[in-house]
Amino acid sequence: MGKTFKRTTVTSALPYANGPVHIGHLAGVYVPADIYVRYLRLKGRDVIFIGGSDEHGVPVTIRARKEGITVQEVVDRYHNLIKQSFEDFGISFDVYSRTTSATHHKLASDFFRKLYDEGKFVEQVSEQFYDEQTGRFLTDRNIRGECPRCHAPEAYGDQCEKCGATLSPEELINPYNAETGNPLVKKATKHWYLPLDKDQEWLEKWILEDHKEWRSNVYGQCKSWLDGGLRPRAVTRDLDWGIPVPVEGAEGKVLYVWFDAPIGYISNTKELCDAHPELGSWETWWKDPETRLVHFIGKDNIVFHCIVFPAMLKAHGEYILPDNVPSNEFLNLEGNKISTSKNYAVWLNEYLVDMPGRQDELRYVLTANAPETKDNDFTWADYQARCNNELVAVYGNFVNRALQLTQKYYEGRVPACGELNDYDRETLAEFRDVKERLENLLENFRFRDAQKEAMNLARIGNKYIADCEPWKVIKTDPERVKTIINISLQLTANLAIAFEPFLPFSSKRLRTMLAMDSFSWEDLGSTSLMQEGHQLPKPELLFTKVEDEAIEAQVRKLEDTVKANAEADYKAEPVKPDIPFEDFEKLDIRVGLVKACEKVKKSKKLLKFTLDDGSGKDRTILSGIAQWYEPERLIGKRVLFVANLAPRQMMGETSCGMILSAVNYNGDLSVTTTLDEVKGGSQVG
């Protein structure tokens, strides 16, 4: 692992206090961080876990204006909601504070002022987009306009969500204020910049040479930025919400949120240490070279924590630099990107209402699917399968068997372990080195593999008790059953320790069922955790099955959200250029009675219509609508079709005309029909 440290400061990204947190946040940052911190605590290491809400920046001001309330009311509401969600899911922060605290305002101001007084900033005047009607400068995300690449009408100032192009506001065609629709002008404004270009050389060595052990996704993104050449970055902005720039003549300017927020880790540590003097000075946790600093973040924050924040710390001159930044990639939801603005997410506070008491189930599935080096996908079908096939059928089944048999045969007392046979020794050998395997994975931030290793311990136990069949052996060799049950209980106790970092709620319940008053990570792998005669209380089920109805309800909720978004976003395609009336008259649109309809062999798209078109002869038309209609549903309908299109050969059939359909807001097709009964062949005009 390299250098040995006396203590560890662990931080996790500060979520914006403009909305609740969702499973993407949990999977990307907070569960991995919590697993790591719980592990370090079990090891007896000195560690603090720092969290808090990011309450500055534009997103919170947008939310306040939308709701017609003050910004402070917004951040108060969501800070409390987010904090409660983390507590509910067992994210074991030592402190969870906020960037609106007086402690943070002073520390962030002092940090800026020190760099300012020492000439570490560059002062520049630049022209930025300005809304004259609101009197506000706008951020990239607050600006919209026509994409210069694909010409989508509502691209953001930093990205076009339709084609994925990375943009700058200057590239947009006809930029406007995303909130008001007002046109924008350019206006000169003065700001202070952190000259990252001067940090290029030492950052290249520090990251590319000294930290090759960082995750490939982190290392790769940093290398890409460094290869592109670093440029000065503004640390102030024109805004009326935030920490005022502590410089004369900077009225109406605040510290840029990217500069202010990471200092929140430091100010939150100060609050913690001020409240708990036994932890020592906050400066020890941030300035002592014997302290290891580890940042847990999502991939959208890699550059800030690996390049920008270290440059800030280095410029200050008194702080340690991060030793590792184990960033995860993004978690998708049912194949689509999670979107807070479109409400397409699984919100933690809503999950606990819908799935009460199932915090560990979600922690388990999110860790099993952790996007550690690439984006991954959460689906409700996978959630149900993992809960039922792994937590219930493997882990829970083994524990229940071991404890129930102890109650049945020995009135809940741990039986003595007798003579071991070869299979007993093989089983004991398999879990004796689990501590070493788990430690190796956890120390290297491989939480997905570590949890899999812990579950493998449950698989060993499940297989052991199933193979030994004590319910049968009890009839012929009751002494042998004592050994089987003893070994099963030792395994069960090991599981309570091994799963503690991953599944804290169920591990606590299991320790209660085992009457384990004390436990230690150092005990992991021991074959004598349960002493002979130890009395166990009556057991309960560790996990329960997730029923189909619960999963179907969650899927419907997402489908309803997608539908609502599609309806809200729908805008009719622009009307095509005018045509002379004579051109329209050339079209012969008629009504056809569908006599027969069937799928075209070897085609997934085409349906074959047989129409009564009033001519006395049947007309055949092929239409690519099989995705939206079962053929039987269309028989007997009166549909509109273009009768005078030249015949076309399609899939070995001759199609004489075109069935008319309307394209719905969500891309579905709807065949056009008549309201009243109309004879086949009737003209439309």
Image (cartoon, rainbow, N blue to C red):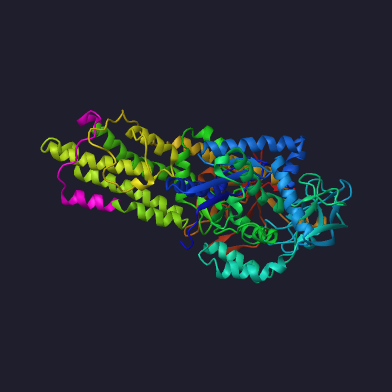
In the rendered view, tell whether residue 317 sits above or below residue 564.
below
Residue 509, picture quadrant: top left
Residue 508 in magenta stretch: no
Residue 425 in magenta stretch: yes
Question: From this viewpoint, is residue 394 visible?
Answer: no
**On the picture, is 5 further left or further right than 573?**
left
**Measuring 76% from the left and 45% from the top, which residue is drawn there?**
242
Residue 415, picture quadrant: top left
**Measuring 13% from the left and 38% from the top, which residue is drawn there?**
479
**Measuring 57% from the left and 66% from the top, which residue is drawn there?**
220
Q: Position of residue 160 (x, y in %)?
A: 70, 58
Front-most of residues 90 and 310: 310
In the rendered view, tell whether residue 493 sits above or below residue 311.
above
In the image, the segment drawn in magenta is 407-431
**Measuring 70% from the left and 44% from the top, which residue is drawn there?**
104
Q: Position of residue 341 (x, y in %)?
A: 67, 45
Front-most of residues 252 and 342: 252
Q: Position of residue 266 (x, y in %)?
A: 64, 49
